[in-house]
Image: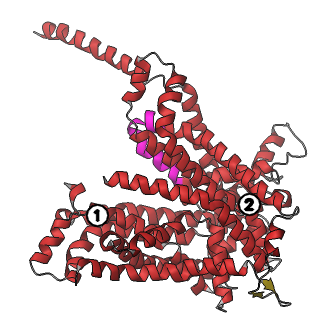
Amino acid sequence: MTGASGTLERPSLRRRYAARRAERRRSFDRPRFLRVLMAGFLLWTFAPIAIVVLFSFNAGKSLQNLDGFSTRWYSDFFGDEQLRQSLFASLEIALVTMVVATVLGSLLAYGLVRARNRLSPVTNVMMLIPLVVPEIVAGVTALLLFTQLGIQLSVTTIILAHITFSISYVTVIVRGRLVALNREVEEAAMDLGATRLQTLRLVVLPGLWPAILAAGLLTFALSFDDFVLSFFTTGESPQPLPVRIYSSIRFGVTPTINAIGSLMLLVSLSTIALALALPRLLGRRGHTVLIGRDAM
Amino acid sequence: MSERRFASLTLLPGAAWLVLLFLVPLGITLAISFGVTDELGNALYAWHPENYDRVFDPLFAPVLLRSVGYAAATVALCLLIGYPVAYYIARFGGRYKYLLVALVVLPFLVNYLIRVYAWTAILSDEGLVNGVLEDLGLTSDGVRFLNTPWAVIGGLTYGYLAFMILPIYAALDRMNPSLIEAGKDLYATGWQTFRHVTWPATFQGVLAGSVLVFLPAVGDFVSAQLLGGPDTYMVGNLIQQQFFDANNFPFGAALTTVLMAFLLIFMVFYLRSAGRAAAEARA
């Protein structure tokens, strides 16, 4: 019995090996230089970041030699009253930008998809341009607006500029989701006597939440990291973190920058992780019926 | 209320915001670019088109050309590095595909300033690379990496590479791999298959990536500021100087307007191709 099954298995095994060998040959041609290039690329991209994080825990001031582990650069950062204020300013700017831009951008997305009047193609183009304008142009135009109107530069002007250049990201993301929504559910709600606002609140919004959340968190991360726009629109104090980093880099390299850079990386990573995790967690709560065509 | 009326209402706040804080400032910039400054350095509206003559002055024109040259070199380098990387991920990524895409995006979560700063720390005269070179006994007085055009172009490439990789990856991923097999079946060599099948099929992605890299690279001033010096300054540095050191807002506005006008072709091209792609995706 066992002998028979053994002889039966062997040819099939052999066939499987042959198939695998053929597959390996087909998947080519996988030129070795591509693999080397890929490895080199990863090394090149991650080495500088690894160095920043590594040296943020360096006991010495040197940027060449590691002199043992220490968190002194982190305590330096948190002990510096001005830097702490900068951190809070950055967080405040990113939070306000996130809330306002997400509301305006989501409404705009809804309007663009459903309004279809003469003005919507024009609005659509106007909404897309901020996405491709170089940051320095954005910074100059914002600065000139404020100075020519005699508005004192401050955290508020930074927030206004950040909102302006964040709306489009939200609109594009939310619109992508809105287009995929199942409109029949909305019509059914209206047939059952729901008003426009009720339909928006009870039917459309639940389906859009994942996209709105993701867009909001992306806006937060972009605003928190932004340098150029903040640089052009910031007042004397408090200045957001990236602006402070820029001025201290210009006056020389200090290890505190490594600590700030690592902390900012942590903030961005957590935001993006939230953006990826939240829609999934929310999606489990049973809104799937309303999410529409692409979910079916 | 009809759906259209309701939707027009929801469109209003965002559209008004963009008109007031985006279009109006563009108009102000254009108006100021013809203006003059008073003794206190305040910008005044006037008719002074000489600002534009100055943009093309022999003193400043090389900076404009340099910016375009550096940005073009950056696009070329990004393509040279980005295409093979995208190709590797799309074709041979297997089950690590999404991990590799995440690895491409991850560095872009690190602040651009910090990433450029990391390179100054690595390449400076007392930096890591020179330290290693000295320990190996290859050099005693250090190699100068910073303040060279290559440092600036390298910084730009490092900064914007993901914008090239992602569209090319998307194009390669969409492409039907049996097209490549068909090429092989018809006895094309690897290079011939690439040239006649893969490259044309992904050309739109290459174009999109090139524009996405070119636009921010031309206007960048951080890389030239931190990795370069006055000899490698780009138009972004020139503009920034007008607003922060020279206090000549009208000239800065004229430079910005010229930059914007030059880039307009690329923006229109990109928006049109993006619009077409969106329409195709919807159909």
Q: Quadrant of the N terminus of chain A?
A: top left
* Residue drawn at point x = 82 percent, y = 64 percent: B56
B46 or A264: nearer the eye? B46
Where is residue B9 shown, x and y percent of the image?
Answer: 34, 83
Main secondary structure type of the part rendered in magenta: helix
Marks 2 and 1, Cα distance to the nearest angstrom?
44 Å
Amino acid under label 1? Leu
Q: Amino acid at mark 2?
A: Gly
Task: Indicate whether B204 appears above or below A175.
Answer: above
> What is the residue that sits farthest to the right in this orientation?
B141
* Residue behind mark 1: A281
Residue range (magenta): B89-106
Specify which label sits upstream in the sequence, 2 or 1: 2
Host chain of mark 1: A
2 and 1 marks in contact (CB < 8 Å): no
Residue at the disc numbered 2: A60
Residue at 41% x, 40% y: name it: B173
Asked if B26 appears above or below B218 in the picture, the reply is: below
Dot 2: element: loop
| Relative vertical location of residue A40 with respect to residue A189 in this rendering, above or below | above
